[in-house]
Amino acid sequence: MTYAFDYGWLADYWPVLLKGIGITVELTLVGGVLGVALGIACAWARALGPTYLRPPVAAYVELIRNTPFLIQLFFIFFGLPALGVRMGELQAANLAMVINLGAYSCEIIRAGIQTTPRGQFEAGASLGMSRIETFRHVVLIPALQRIWPALSSQIVIVMLGSAAVSQIAAEDLTFAANFIQSRTFRAFEAYFVSTLIYLALAILLRQALRGIGWGLFPKRSAR
Amino acid sequence: MNDFTTWDILRNLLLAARWTVLLSVVSFIGGGLVGALLLFLRIGKSRLGQIFVRFYVEIFQGTPLLMQLFLAFFGLGLFGIDVPAWLAAAVALILWSAAFLTEIWRGCVEAVARGQWEASSSLGMGYLQQMRYVILPQALRVAVPPTVGFSVQVVKGTALTSIIGFVELSKAGTMVTNATFEPFTVYGFVALIYFCLCWPLSKSSQILERKLNVAHRNH
């Protein structure tokens, strides 16, 4: 191997990387929050909602879980304008991530909801809570607590999957790496550095989600 | 300009889907072999081996598959090899699948009760014998549904190889779109073909899991 590694471009191009990181983080935040919200709504519909809502939600979940994210992205960005729905690359990227995470988190959260003992619903009702109050206070929070680790990994997976949005020219971290390698011809180094950044982001995100879990859920007494 | 019938579009996509299937099979089998090797290191006695596998898994699960594909594509090139896209794609997907499969299987091995290890070692079995006759037969049963489930991730992962220029279903979708200017139809079909590949796998994973649970309850 006679190749000489050169990271000199970092001095000139770090603002590009930084901007890319910003977009990736922004996409993850929006996608994560709205995606989980969509997942909660779908999980409610599938587990407890009216019967007529269940088949369409199940179809949505199956369709998204069994097709690649890249194709969902292309369909939204290139395909939907044929129906007159036009959007910028960042909106398309955000929408694709929300739809994608919505389907996965629906299944995860539903698993949490369905393990709620029957008596919890009855206990909520007997305290005079409405169905919505019971769902919010008695069912949802403990369900989220049970499945929080699985949900956290899924959010990290979606963050890593967001690398694909560079393909519709959303200027995320991968886009920045592509840009740098096309300017400097240092392809390996550019991708190596951005891979390390992704690794750091994944580790940070995992820690942040653990922290959110700590803050969000009531502490259980040691059993 | 040529006119493309819907059948022309679908036919070209289906022809390209063969490469998606082939790459998925190669990656899954290759990933399974490497993953099994890593599994033996991970649950083996060697401290160094355990640490190595932990790092390996952390790196491959903590970075985007797309980046791994880029690094395989440009990294192999550093050795002076002219890297065809299919080679980079297969190498990256095999290493990536191995990381996930080894984690899945580790969970399955750990699900086998501690006492089974102790019982078999009290019968004077060595490590390999324990594995062969006691642990693996039990762990394999638990491992089947999640392993089948992961194969769906592999099929979907192959879509990213289109970005480094491997012509499979997604790349064909882009090429056909560029020729026909009908992205809605083309990507709709592409999604449908992926769905037809993945859904049976997802479904059988669910069914296997349910069957296995029944077996568990009866024991």
Image (tube, rainbow, N blue to C red):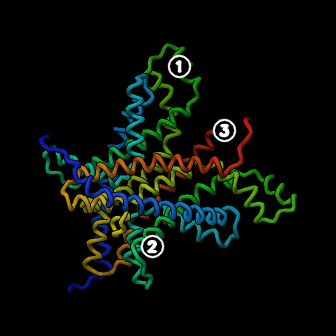
Q: Secondary structure at mark 1?
A: helix
User: In the image, B45: left or right of A114?
Assistant: left
- Which chain letter matches label 3? B
Image disc number at residue A91: 2
Q: Image quadrant for the N terminus of chain A?
A: top left
Residue in the foreground of this view, choosing between B12 and B68: B68
- Discs 1, 2 touching: Cβ within 8 Å: no
Which chain hosts label 1?
B
Give the number of the mark in front: 1 or 3: 1
Q: Residues within 10 Å of mark 2 (few under 14, many from 20)?
A: some
Does label 2 lie on the same chain as label 3?
no
- In 3D space, how far apart are the residues under numbered discs 1 and 3 (Cα atoms)? 24 Å
Residue beneath disc 3: B218
A193, B202: nearer the viewer: A193
Residue sitting nearer the eye, A178 or A54: A178
Looking at the rendered structure, whether the residues under marks 1 and 3 are on a common chain is answered as yes
Callouts 1 and 3 close, C-beta under 8 Å: no
Inspect the image, locate mark 3, and give the three-letter code of the amino acid beneath it. Answer: Asn
Q: Amino acid at mark 1?
A: Ser
Spatial CA distance of label 1 from label 2 is 58 Å
Label 2 amino acid?
A: Gln
In-image side of A196 versus A45 (left or right): left
